[in-house]
């Protein structure tokens, strides 16, 4: 797992910049720091932060240092497009400059049918094999994200079974996992030794998701118990969005998200090692 043993140390909490792309990244960084987070994660839209440009990376690193924030991950573009290797490699090198240990990526469409899974899997293996050198070069690992339950997430399962566990692991997304739920948290158990990072949020109903925990139906304490049993030690990354939240002021939204992230950290680590 990414991260070291965090029991008894300051909580590591993070929020993704996708919480509201209409807010410039510089403003986001200040708001995230003011809310009390220790980390920030860059969302899947590189144009929002400009992190692929050297000048912007220098500016962002300075801004993060000014407010005392670290970066825990960057969400790359999907790995099933023809230019995936080039794009993901650039993201990994940028992540290394930010000292972010992890790149998150979807490896296929968000939803798909079983037809053509073998062809998709072959493409995934080819792409991931080509990413191993950049992972070794930078020390950055790749977390493959579960998406729609069923064939699309089964593709992630099958890929991880055969990929190098030192380079490729799981990004557990709670809101995706609970589509058409409540559902059991079997995915956490299945990859308990391969969870590199998390995208945590609640789900209200179909197409109304990525809300602050407590605004939806996900059994949060049960999920925390599973992550505790899996000895997850990385930052508690909240991939929440303001779109469907009852909190529409950015500062209030982030403060509430940080409060729940802190509680989630405590729930996962309060009895770590006892399961």
Image (spheres, grey):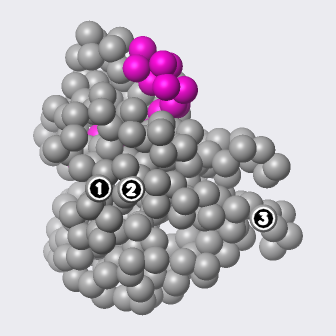
Left or right of 217 on screen, residue 5:
right
Residue ID at (38%, 33%): 29
Q: Which residue is mark 3?
A: 270
Front position in the image: 268 or 27: 27
Nearer the observer: mark 1 or 3; the answer is 1
Measured Cα–Cα span from mark 1 to mark 2 = 5 Å
Instruction: Identify the mark nearer the N-term, 1 or 3.
Output: 1
Front position in the image: 12 or 29: 29
Residue ID at (29%, 56%): 249
Q: Is residue 223 magenta?
A: no
Q: Which residue is mark 1?
A: 249
Residue ID at (42%, 27%): 95
Q: Position of residue 32 (x, y in %)?
A: 43, 41
Element at label 2: helix
Measured Cα–Cα span from mark 3 to mark 2 = 27 Å
Asked whether disc 3 touches disc 2, contact meaning CB atoms under 8 Å apart, the reply is no
Is any atom of residue 153 visible in this view?
Answer: no
Residue ID at (46%, 54%): 255
Element at label 1: loop
Position of residue 239 relative to residue 189, above or below, is above
Q: What residue span does the magenta drawing correspond to? A: 62-79
Q: Position of residue 81 (x, y in %)?
A: 15, 45
Position of residue 59 relative to residue 181, above or below, is above
Q: Position of residue 35 (x, y in %)?
A: 48, 45
Q: Count neighbours of disc 3 (C-alpha within 10 A) and say few if under 14, some if 14 to 19, many if 20 or more.
A: few
Q: Which residue is mark 2?
A: 252
């Amino acid at each position: 797992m990414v991260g070291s043993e965090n029991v008894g140390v300051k909580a590591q909490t993070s929020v993704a910049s996708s919480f509201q792309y209409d807010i410039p990244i510089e403003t986001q960084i200040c708001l995230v720091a003011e809310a009390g987070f220790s980390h920030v994660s860059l969302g899947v839209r590189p144009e929002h932060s400009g992190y692929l440009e050297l000048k912007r990376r220098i500016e962002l690193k300075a801004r993060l240092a000014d407010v005392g924030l670290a970066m825990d991950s960057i969400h790359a573009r999907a790995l099933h497009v023809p230019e995936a290797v080039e794009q993901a490699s650039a993201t990994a090198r940028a992540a290394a400059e930010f000292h972010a240990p992890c790149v998150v990526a979807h490896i296929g469409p968000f939803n798909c049918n079983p037809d053509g899974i073998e062809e998709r899997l072959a493409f995934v293996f080819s792409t991931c094999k080509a990413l191993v050198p950049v992972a070794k070069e930078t020390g950055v690992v790749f977390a493959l994200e579960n998406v729609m339950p069923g064939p699309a997430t089964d593709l992630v399962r099958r890929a991880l079974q055969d990929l190098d566990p030192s380079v490729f692991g799981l990004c557990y997304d709670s809101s995706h996992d609970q589509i058409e739920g409540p559902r059991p948290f079997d995915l956490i158990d299945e990859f308990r030794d391969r969870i590199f990072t998390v995208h945590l949020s609640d789900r209200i109903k179909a197409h109304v998701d990525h809300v602050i925990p407590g605004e939806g139906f996900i059994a949060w304490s049960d999920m925390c118990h599973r992550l505790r049993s899996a000895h997850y030690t990385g930052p508690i990354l909240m991939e929440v969005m303001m779109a469907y939240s009852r909190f529409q002021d950015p500062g209030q939204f982030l403060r509430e998200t940080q409060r729940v992230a802190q509680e989630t950290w405590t729930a996962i680590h309060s009895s770590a090692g006892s399961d």
